[in-house]
Image (cartoon, rainbow, N blue to C red):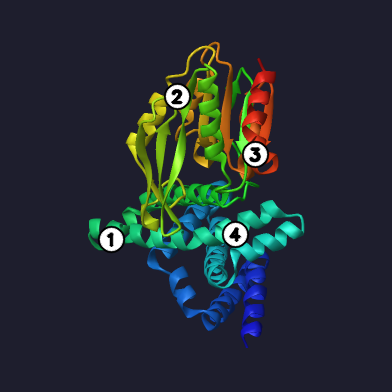
Amino acid sequence: MNRIAALMLVVATGVVLFGSPLWAVWSLMVAVAAAWYLDPPAVRAGLRVGIVLAVVFAASVTAAVVAWAEGPERGLTVGGTVLLRLLVLTVGGMVLVRRVDAEALLRLTTRLGFERLGLVLGLSLNALPRIAEASSDVWTAYSMRSRGLAGRLRRLPGLGEVMLAHTARVAEEAAAAASLRGHSALTRPRIELPLPVRVVIVTGPTDGGKTKTVLALAERLQHEGVPVAGFVQIGERESESKVGFRLRDIATGEEAELAKLGKRSEGEFGTRFRFLDEGFQLGREALARVRSGGIVIVDELGPVELRGAGHMPAVQRAVNTPGIAGAVVVVRRPLVPALLAALEASDAVVVDVEEVGGGSVEAIIDALGAGR
């Protein structure tokens, strides 16, 4: 019966999306009934007051625009059709969220050569419950501030604006989280990073020795009399789990807490970590120490920086210091293509610490020397 109900849901959804308005009404009823048979909690979640009102608002705006352009009758027809389609998509989407493994979907689409499509679908499925929860919270807040149904209806335009903002925020965090898990198909750097000197990109597997490598590099360069400025980010662990990061100024050895593991709802930048101002402040101070003839070391740049936030403003200032000899930037493997796309460097070399092994420091020094 579950397969029959699933088939009915798919067929009814197709009719609502592509059929005539008359057929759409009956098909919506079939779709909701099939979804209810498959997963009643999903239907209840999809038909929350906040979500339904947001759908009605979107359909009403569409109807008003079309009515203004083509007449009231056409506006009502188009608005009603949009309403039915959004409702069936909401209900069907909630069922999919609870029954479809987004990672399995991504693996399948990647094998078929459609990684970007799979990532978009997976992110949509993962983000839908959060949008539904946000819509319910927003409607509750609006209800408490308004007197009676009339007052709530007057606030509907504002509700739509708030929900658009929430949707954009959820989408941004979902894309950042996907990048942190190694999915880079949607990673688009929002900044351009001009580097007038040789840049060496240090990469490798997670916990593969990237930070240890650049610390050894800094010690070697300082021993040879080369000025070094920048920072490394050292993970803090409890019971084999990473619970935070400390930022260390390479030149002075000073440290400050950069991030702490928190509750999922407290995370920032699409992660479960809360970031602290003192860590970013020390990072700015560390990068400001760079001098002519010196080397800048940044451990590491991530999705946050590639969107122009985090350490990126200080990094941009540091790498454009007149007369510096080079820059060493640590980045995770999946983000190497995005970093290369953001660079405006005369030349860049990638050193993978896993592939090079024990000769990583020498490889980086050789790459920096080739640019002088």
Q: Which element is circle 4 on?
A: helix
Q: Are marks 3 and 1 in contact (CB under 8 Å)?
A: no
For badge 1, the amino acid type reads Ser
Q: CA distance from mark 4 to mark 2?
A: 38 Å
- For marks 3 and 2, the one nearer the N-term is 2
Which one is in front, 340 or 292? 292
Q: Tell me what residue is drawn at x 63 percent, y 88 percent.
A: 1
Q: CA distance from mark 1 to mark 2?
A: 49 Å
Quadrant, the C terminus = top right
Mark 2 secondary-structure assignment: helix
User: What residue does disc 2 label?
Assistant: 287
Q: Position of residue 259 (x, y in %)?
A: 38, 44
Q: Which residue is mark 1?
A: 143
For residue 313, the mark is none
* Labels 3, 2: front one: 3
Residue under the point 51% across and 80% down = 36
Mark 3 residue type: Gly
Name which residue type carries label 4. Answer: Gly
Circle nearer the N terminus (3, 1): 1
How far is the residue under mark 4 from the one under mark 1? 33 Å
Disc 2 marks a residue whose amino acid type is Leu
Q: Is residue 41 visible?
A: yes
Given contact means CB atoms under 8 Å apart, are the residues at marks 3 and 2 in contact? no
Q: Nearer the viewer, residue 195 or 189?
A: 195
**What percent of the width, then of the height, locates residue 104?**
64, 65
Using the numbered discs, state the Cα–Cα distance from disc 3 to disc 1 in whole angstroms. Answer: 63 Å
Residue for badge 3:
358
